[in-house]
Image: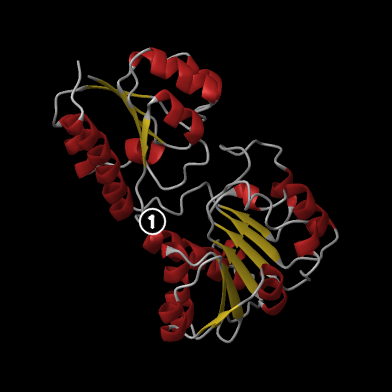
Amino acid sequence: MNILVTSTSFLDTPGKHHDLLNSKGYKIEFLRGPLVESDIYNVIHKYDGIVCGDDEYTEKVLKKGAESKVKIISKYGVGLDKINLKSAGKLGIEVRNCKGVNHSTVAEHVFTLLLSFSKNMHLHLKKGWERKTGFEIKGKSIGIVGLGNIGKAVARIANAFEMNVLGFDKIYDESFLRENSIKKCQSINELVEESDIITLHLNLNKSTKHIINKELLNFFNQTKILINTARSNLVDLEALLEKLESNKIGAYLTDVLDFEPMVEDHPLKKFSNVYITPHVSSRTKENVEKQGLMAVQNLFNFFDQRPFN
């Protein structure tokens, strides 16, 4: 059995997930992702199963995999937007992910970004003694777009900071809203208009792509902050750049970009009120191990249920 692993978080972090991966005696090969279509297309025929990161599994790639021996793609992580699920289903390739695994560490990263910006940490973490005046987040209104596991974790932390919490989603957990004093917004426009800070926690699909668009960005001003630890294409980059150029947004704090790794001349890099972290919101030792174990176990469970030569 030949297994390919492409997740850099998995590769770079020692732990029990490596022990589990090696426990079956399968042949394991590693490539550093995220891989583009051509990278995967050239090698996919060699493998029975794959533990992937945010690689491009297009119809072309999946068809070649199905024609050889690929039976399962186990996603290290939650988001499946880079995998053509419709094609995978038609071709008989199983796709599994790590549901509900990231909520604590991603929620912590949201506040790492927010507190770093509010306290001017990028300016203060140096050997000099230049001091800037920051602002408190206590009493600020935070609007959470998407109240799944991560959004709920963000809400709990926000309450601990004594923030006013607003939420918007298609489906609401009414008891959670009541227990955590969350105002239910009837539209995303209402949430953005009433929030000082907006944080995105949605899957990327046809209905959510560019949910933060030019029209919605018109509700922003010089103090509103947008945080994105989900997927870059939830935000219309061109519309965002217009707002940044005209100084009509307080800040954009993101852990995700349209193309990763970040290119040297990325247009967001020139703005002092843009913070970019390199897609590390889920990369903690505890979470990598937990996520890695789940991804490998998903792979092994499939093989145990459907053994083949």
Residue 43 placement: quadrant: top left
Q: Is residue 128 visible?
A: no
The percent position of residue 87, horizontal first and vertical second, equals 49, 28
Q: Is 71 situated left or right of 111 in this image?
A: left
The percent position of residue 266, horizontal first and vertical second, equals 70, 41
Front residue of 83 and 159: 83
Residue at screen point 46% across, 31% down: 33
**Can you name the residue that lies furthest to the front here?**
90
Classify mark 1: residues with Cα within 10 Å, few (<14), some (14-19) or many (20+).
Answer: many
Which quadrant, please, contains the C terminus? top left
Q: How is the image coloured?
A: secondary structure
Give the residue type at disc 1: Asn
Residue at screen point 51% across, 67% down: 171
Which quadrant, please, contains the N terminus? top left
User: How many numbered discs sit on the rendered protein?
Assistant: 1
Say which element carries label 1: loop
* Residue position for label 1: 102
Front residue of 161 and 1: 1
Residue at screen point 42% across, 24% down: 91
Q: Is residue 89 visible?
A: yes
The percent position of residue 139, horizontal first and vertical second, equals 58, 87
